[in-house]
Image: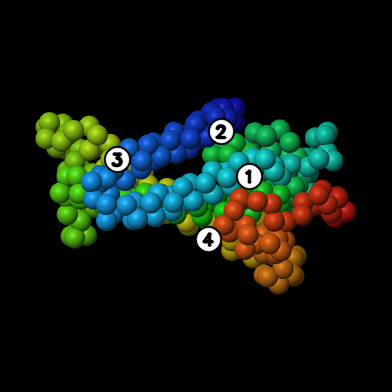
Amino acid sequence: MFTRMLKLRLLNAVAPAYFFMATAVTFILHFCFFIPTIFPNKDTSLRGSATLHTVVFLFLMFNALGNYIMTIKYPAESTNETVVPVCSAHCSDKVDAHYLLNGRHFCKLCKKVILKRDHHCFFTGNCIGNKNMRYFIMFCIYTSCTCLYSLVLGVAFLTVEYSISFENPLTFLTLLPLSTGYFFTGTISGLQLFLVLMLYVWLGIGLVCAGFCCQQVLLVARGQTWCQMQRGQLVDNRSPWRTNLKDVFGTRWILGLILPVQTAETSSEDTDAHKQD
């Protein structure tokens, strides 16, 4: 138990550093390699395309980082409970959290009581719950879009700079093992191998975030959390899916799709949670 908890705490510190490092690398590759190579300054006819791609990338990156910050800024912790309640006798959580009652958990990593806890996100370093679920979902959406967009630009860069053709679907599947072999034989540079590795990193992160986002939206529509699903707990919430989504995304949900701003009221949720006890 102690060893596993130590690993979780280490992961809680390493994951945010990995996220910021991957973000910085993506930013540098985009502006120092992809745009200058794909859209050279000498070709004036491509300036409009270069500007468009730059604006799209900055928009995706701004929303990904903005919702990341909002996820941390609005934690799901209870502001009314400063003392850790006694763990419920029916507690089924053994490692990272104790289930209390009515969707309230005590997170051992955050060391706080969490309202309607869904899960602990290691990349943000805090728990995802009733107050920051919308920002977390939008963070996943824009992170996925940023990674898949960077993947497309990376493929275009390798095509222009190194004349690698991706017309054959097997090219991408065999690109990493072949590039690794060529690197150790001195055929290609370390930069080219690193770019190939980043293609697979972007693909992996993009697909994982997209899948995780779809799962979270489905749970929100059902009025259920990941913790409840893991325990096999049936949801007593009979509200329609539109109401459940509105509770999380708010009435100004369209604005929340394009800007990382607060769109739902959260001031009374602590009181509402305690009324259920």
Q: Identity of the amino acid at label 3? A: Phe
Residue corresponding to mark 2? 12
Residue corresponding to mark 3? 33
Q: Earlier in the sequence, mark 4 or mark 2?
A: 2
Quarter occupied by the N terminus? top right
Q: CA distance from mark 4 to mark 3?
A: 32 Å
Residue 92 rendering spot, x and y as whole percentages: 68, 46
Q: Earlier in the sequence, mark 1 or mark 3?
A: 3
Q: CA distance from mark 2 to mark 3?
A: 32 Å
Q: Nearer the viewer, mark 1 or mark 3?
A: 3
Residue corresponding to mark 1? 71
Q: CA distance from mark 4 to mark 2?
A: 24 Å
Label 3 SS: helix
Q: Residues within 10 Å of mark 2 (few under 14, many from 20)?
A: many
Q: Residues within 10 Å of mark 4 (few under 14, many from 20)?
A: some
Q: Nearer the viewer, mark 2 or mark 3?
A: 3
Residue corresponding to mark 4? 214
